[in-house]
Image (cartoon, rainbow, N blue to C red):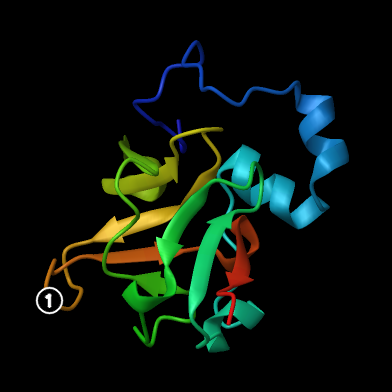
Amino acid sequence: MLFKRDKTPAETFPVARSENAWREALSPEAFRVLRQHGTERPGTSPLNAEKRPGTFSCAGCGTPLFEAGTKFESGTGWPSFFAPIEGAVCETADRSFFMTRTEVHCAQCGGHLGHVFPDGPQPTGLRYCMNGVSLAFHPADN
């Protein structure tokens, strides 16, 4: 099997919707990434260039995930962060594409956000490499 994840189909999250409800609520690309564990093409997200203070939240359920101050330029083509907001994300083993990676998903709706790698900057040394389509940006109030 090409795709294998440790997450069980019975896993539930506080924000739950039927597949049809998710399809209606999300764009086709956001549905593919958030609900079907897809990946957007690198360099396609306008959030790559987002530099304003604010918060990045889950595009599926609105849960705040990353503060803008944790965003950094990784050169990968995807928005990258060195730390999530405490308790906002969960991680599972992703054994797709003949490798093992750590998948990151929203702790509230289970939406697939991206992966985390151990090659980020200090203070954490982590790179949360997120699909921009799985995020929404909310600028800080002045």
- In the image, taking residue 117 as reference, residue 84 lies left or right, namely right
Q: Residues within 10 Å of mark 1 (few under 14, many from 20)?
A: few
Depicted 77 relative to depicted 129: above or below? below
**Quadrant of the image containing the N terminus:** top left
Q: For the point 37% across and 55% down, which residue is it?
A: 115
Residue, far top: 10
- In the image, taking residue 18 as reference, residue 85 lies left or right, namely left
Residue 119 screen position, x and y as percent: 17, 72
Depicted 28 relative to depicted 136: above or below? above
Q: For the point 62% across and 50% down, which residue is it?
A: 33
Which residue is denoted by mark 1 in the rendering? 122
Residue 45 screen position, x and y as percent: 63, 77
Q: Look at the image and tell me whether residue 78 can be seen.
A: no
In this figure, what is the number of numbered marks? 1
**Quadrant of the image containing the C terminus:** bottom right
Residue 121 screen position, x and y as percent: 17, 78
Q: For the point 36% across and 46% down, which residue is it?
A: 103
Q: Nearer the viewer, residue 58 or 1?
A: 58
Q: Nearer the viewer, residue 9 or 4?
A: 9
The amino acid sitting under disc 1 is: Gln
Q: Nearer the viewer, residue 58 or 35?
A: 58
